[in-house]
Amino acid sequence: MIKEFEGIIVSVTPYGETSKILNILTKEAGIIGVMAKGAKSMKSRFRSVTEKFTIGVFSVYYHEGKLSTLIQADVTEPLVNIKKDIVRIGYLTYIVELAHQTAKQNSDSAIYDKLLSTIKKIESGLDPMIMTNILELKLLDYLGVSIDLDRCIKCGNTKDIITINGDVGGYICKNCRTNEEIYDVKTIKMFRMYYYVEIDTISDLKVSSVVANNINKILTDYYDRYTGLYLKSKEFLNTIK
C-alpha cells in the first residue's frame, strides 16, 4: 500500500553499496523504517532528500512493522539558518535524538508536533537553549517522569514555592524545604511557564541569562538522574557550548 507521511529523518544507515535505510519520525505512525534504494548514488534523485534532519513529506510503499520503500520525498523545511551555525546544529542534533528516543517509548503524535515546532522556532532565530529546555520539559510527560509544577509536592501549598526536588517530583515550598537549593522567584515562575506555554505561540523570549541558565541546570540534572537516557549529542552540545 502506498502511504504518505509527514516526518523528519532521525537516523540514516548505509545499506550495500548504493542504498540507505532511514528511520523517520512521523506524525502519523511514530518511527518507521524506510529503504531508500540507490540513494547514495551521485545521480540519485533521493541523494539530497535522504540526509539526516531532512523534514518533509515522504511517500512510501508501506509495510507496517517492516521495512517500507521510499517512492518520493519533498522537503518542507530546508533549515537554512540552522545549518549555518554550529551551535544551532548542535541543538538540532540533540533535540532530534531526544525526540527519537522518546518516541521509542511513546508513539504519541504530539512528540513529532512539539519537535517540529521547536525546530521552526530555532530556525526563526529564537534562543536555541531556551527552546530546547521548553521541549525537554514537555517531553518528560511522555518519558513517564513528569514534574508537578502546580503546588508543593509535599503539602499542596500553592504559595511560597522556592525550589524543585527531583526526588519527590515537583515544587517545594519554604515550609517543606530541607536541604534543596533555593531558586529566585523568576526562575520558579519561568520554569512553570516553560511547561505550559504552547510552542507555536512563542514569538519572543525575554528571559535573563541567570534564569535561563538556572532552568537549563535543573533540567540537565533531572534528565541525567531520572530519564535513563544517555545521548551522545548532549555531550557534543556541551562541548561546542
Image (spheres, rainbow, N blue to C red):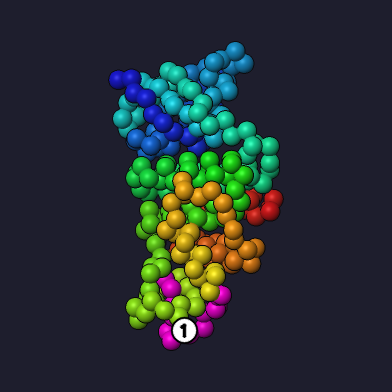
Q: Main secondary structure of the magenta part?
A: loop
* Residue type (three-letter) at the residue carrying disc 1: Lys
Residue drawn 56% across the image and 51% down it:
204
Quadrant position of residue 159: bottom left
Image quadrant in which the N terminus is located: top left
Residue drawn 69% across the image and 50% down it:
240
In x, y percent, where is residue 210? 64, 67
- Is residue 93 visible in the rendered image? The answer is no
In terms of depth relative to the viewer, which is nearer, 213 or 106? 213
In terms of depth relative to the viewer, which is nearer, 172 or 127? 127
Which residue lies under the disc numbered 1?
Answer: 174
The magenta segment is 169-184
In x, y percent, where is residue 193? 47, 61
Quadrant position of residue 125: top right
In x, y percent, where is residue 160? 45, 80
Q: Is residue 102 left or right of residue 12?
A: left
Residue 149 in magenta stretch: no
In the structure shown, which secondary structural element does the residue marked by tag 1 occupy? loop
